[in-house]
Amino acid sequence: TQTIQSLCKWLINNDYQSERFYDPCVGRGQILKTLRANGFKSLSGSDLRADNIYGTGGVDFLNDCTNDLSCNGNIIMNPPFNLSLEFLQAALHETNKDIFLLQRLDWLSSKSRQQVMNQHLQGVLVLASRPTFYKADESLPVDAAYEPRSGGTKDFAWYVFNNSPRAQFIKSI
């Protein structure tokens, strides 16, 4: 949650708190739970899985991304790493608001992502601390706490995309 907490502070400082957010890869809801705990109210999420998730189950964002959940709002997500570009492209078709995508810092350097980076990248919020990721225990209820672990080994950032990017920025948060 520290990964999300640092983004929450940035979002609050940049007047996003009253805006709508949708997470199409909600899973167990760590992103939305942290936003809600920080006063964000207009939140929704979905996931391809139908069971034991924090949101609406059975929604295939990549193949049926036009849905009521994401209309007219920002999209925030930590998609499966091997499908990040596909999720980003679907999100760009879904909203004209900002898209926040959690990904490794080295995700910037790739020929396959060059066009989307040049056309839609608005900002990069580099995480000052390396995040630790937890594998969810699917046998536990969706609100169960994660076991604390030691720090991560890779650098990550929140990438901010928009169909009409404003001034570009890189910040450490």
Image (cartoon, rainbow, N blue to C red):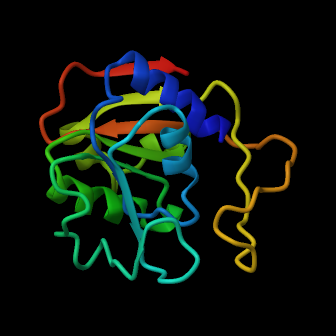
* Residue 45 visible at all: yes
Q: How many labels does the image show?
A: 0
Left or right: 32 as drawn, with respect to 58: right
Is 10 situated above or below 61?
above
Left or right: 73 as drawn, with respect to 149: left
- Name the residue rendered at 14%, 44% in the picture: 96
Q: Residue 10, position in %: x, y?
A: 46, 22
Q: Residue 42, position in %: x, y?
A: 32, 45
- Name the residue rendered at 55%, 38% in the picture: 37
- Name the residue rendered at 71%, 67% in the picture: 136
Is 39 situated above or below 102?
above
* Residue 126 visible at all: no
Is 53 situated above or below 40?
below
Nearest the eye: 140 or 3: 140
Left or right: 103 as drawn, with respect to 19: right
Nearest the eye: 156 or 5: 5
Q: Residue 60, position in %: x, y?
A: 33, 78
Q: Residue 105, position in %: x, y?
A: 54, 39
* Quadrant (top left/top right/bottom left/bottom right) for the N terminus: top right
Left or right: 111 as drawn, with respect to 35: left
- Name the residue rendered at 22%, 46% in the picture: 73
* Quadrant (top left/top right/bottom left/bottom right) for the C terminus: top right
